[in-house]
């Protein structure tokens, strides 16, 4: 049986803002929040091996701006002595949360939330106990679809990391990693909700105990599959993910307990049966952070955008336009429409500071952060080139730079291409930096 070589602690804190604040996630919203259907939480996991320590903070928010991340890290370092580069701050990307994530929008909410996150790290550290880390994956493809092309890629693998203190106690935490937008609730919803990741966490905590943490991956082009836009559907979708994670976590528990067996009556023997997943080995906590400046794209003047939209709509209204051609034209209309709606043609050229972070856990496992809405193909690329058996991709982490499509996607137009502040090549440059950060921890 593997030794208990790491300490793990976890904590949960309510970060629901006051009702009445503007909500984020949908351009079609104009009214402020009117209620709370389920609270927004931040869930924290802390790992320590005696020589090093890391903290994972995941918030039920649309995103985590650089100011919230910086203030949280500053407070964690001041209170716990944990260096900033060892603290990862991410969002579940719920579209049923507050819009004010920057100091200039909601300074009090940012300050209060950062203090709560730092406090949760302190609580998690105080509760830490020896554990074994169990890691496994299971196929999951029923709750999501590529929102740009129904035949396009999705995340079809659900990864689960369990901090197991022993079979007679619940897990310290169960971390679930997947990639799918948190958008079961639509723009007409004015109640705060953690959407399906919150329902997943509640399901997991009921079934297993301990703290459940959802790590959103590269979900920029992946939407949930739904049958309605209400809270019943939130619970259904979250329940599907929670059930898959619960089953895998239970199947892995014998890894930390010495194995599992079945009696063979013909041989009068107990036969060992392999458990799912693996025990992480070579535990060694470390961190690497890379910061780079990425060029912003230069857009045509507003008048050119308006002229192109008029031409596209005229073409779509023409007789004899095929369904395939209409879809192609619509994608271009959607791209230019958001440029006009959000005034993106007036943005100034320059550079955007971007951070990528890698947190080493073991010989097989590391967390890798991407600071915005990256496509599932980019997440896969980073995971594959990291050369790890159990990579955990954290999208919407350590910053919020918006959509970052792969270079090949620009020719397909669409909403995400219209919204991005970057030109082709940005996703690839950031992915290269992320892979290099991971590899530097295993050199």
Image (cartoon, grey):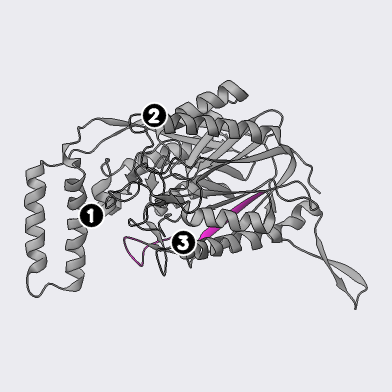
Q: Residue 107 carries which label?
A: 2
Q: In the picture provided, is 306 more to the left or to the right than 294?
A: left
Q: Which residue was labeled with disc 3?
A: 231
Region of the chain picked out in magenta, as a range: 147-162
Was residue 157 drawn as part of the magenta stretch in this picture? yes
Q: How crowded is mark 2: few (under 14 residues within 10 Å), some or many (20 or more)?
A: some
Q: Quadrant location of residue 268?
A: bottom right
Among numbered discs 3 and 1, the one appearing first in the sequence: 3
Q: Is mark 1 on a helix, strand or loop?
A: helix
- In the figure, 384 relative to 127: above or below? below
Quick check: 10 left or right of 253?
A: left
Residue at coordinates 37% horizontally, 29% vertically from top-left? 103
Check disc 1 and report the residue beneath it: 411
Quarter of the figure that contains the C terminus: top right
Q: How far apart are marks 3 and 2 (CA)?
A: 30 Å
Q: Earlier in the sequence, mark 3 or mark 2?
A: 2
Circle 2 SS class: helix
Question: Horizontal and vertical percent for residue 273?
Answer: 78, 65
| Label 3 environment density (alpha carbons within 10 Å; few <14, some 14–19, many ≥20) | some
In terms of depth relative to the viewer, which is nearer, 421 or 76?
A: 76
347, above or below 32, in the image: above
Earlier-in-chain disc, 1 versus 2: 2
Q: Which of 55 and 93 is in front in this view?
A: 93
Q: Nearer the viewer, mark 3 or mark 1?
A: 3
Residue at 11% over, 54% down: 309
């Amino acid at each position: 049986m593997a030794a208990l070589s790491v300490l793990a602690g976890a904590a949960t804190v309510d970060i629901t803002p006051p009702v009445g604040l503007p909500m984020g996630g949908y351009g079609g919203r104009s009214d402020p929040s009117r209620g709370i259907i389920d609270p927004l939480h931040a869930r924290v996991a802390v790992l320590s091996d005696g020589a090093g320590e890391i903290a994972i903070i995941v918030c039920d928010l649309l995103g985590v701006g650089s100011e919230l991340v910086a203030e949280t890290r500053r407070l964690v370092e001041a209170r716990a002595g944990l260096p900033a580069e060892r603290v990862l701050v991410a969002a579940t990307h719920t579209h049923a949360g507050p819009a004010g994530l920057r100091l200039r929008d909601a300074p009090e909410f940012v300050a209060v939330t950062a203090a709560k996150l730092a406090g949760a790290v302190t609580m998690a550290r105080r509760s830490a106990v020896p554990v074994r880390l169990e890691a496994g994956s299971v196929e999951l493809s029923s709750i999501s679809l590529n929102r740009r092309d129904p035949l396009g890629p999705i995340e079809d693998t659900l990864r689960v990391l369990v901090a197991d203190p022993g079979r007679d106690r619940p897990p310290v935490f169960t971390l679930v990693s997947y990639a799918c937008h948190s958008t079961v609730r639509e723009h007409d919803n004015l109640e705060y909700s953690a959407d399906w990741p919150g329902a997943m966490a509640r399901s997991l905590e009921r079934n297993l105990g301990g703290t459940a943490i959802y790590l959103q991956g590269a979900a920029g082009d992946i939407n949930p599959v739904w049958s309605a836009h209400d809270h019943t559907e939130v619970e259904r979708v979250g329940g599907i993910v929670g059930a898959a994670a619960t089953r895998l976590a239970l199947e892995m528990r014998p890894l930390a307990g010495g194995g599992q067996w079945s009696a063979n009556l013909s041989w009068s023997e107990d036969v060992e049966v392999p458990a799912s997943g693996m025990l992480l080995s070579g535990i060694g906590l470390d961190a690497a952070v890379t910061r780079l400046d990425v060029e912003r794209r230069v857009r045509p003047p507003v008048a050119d955008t308006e002229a192109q939209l008029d031409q596209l709509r005229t073409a779509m209204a023409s007789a004899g336009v095929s369904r395939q051609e209409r879809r192609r034209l619509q994608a271009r209309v959607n791209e230019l429409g958001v440029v006009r709606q959000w005034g993106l043609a007036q943005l100034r050229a320059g550079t955007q500071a971007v951070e990528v972070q890698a947190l080493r856990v073991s010989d097989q496992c590391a967390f890798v952060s991407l600071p915005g809405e990256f496509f599932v193909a980019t997440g896969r690329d980073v995971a594959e080139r990291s050369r790890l058996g159990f990579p955990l991709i954290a999208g919407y982490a350590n910053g919020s730079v918006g959509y970052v499509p792969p270079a090949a996607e620009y020719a397909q137009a669409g909403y995400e291409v219209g919204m991005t502040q970057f030109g082709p090549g940005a996703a690839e440059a950031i992915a290269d930096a992320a892979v290099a950060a991971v590899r530097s921890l295993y050199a």
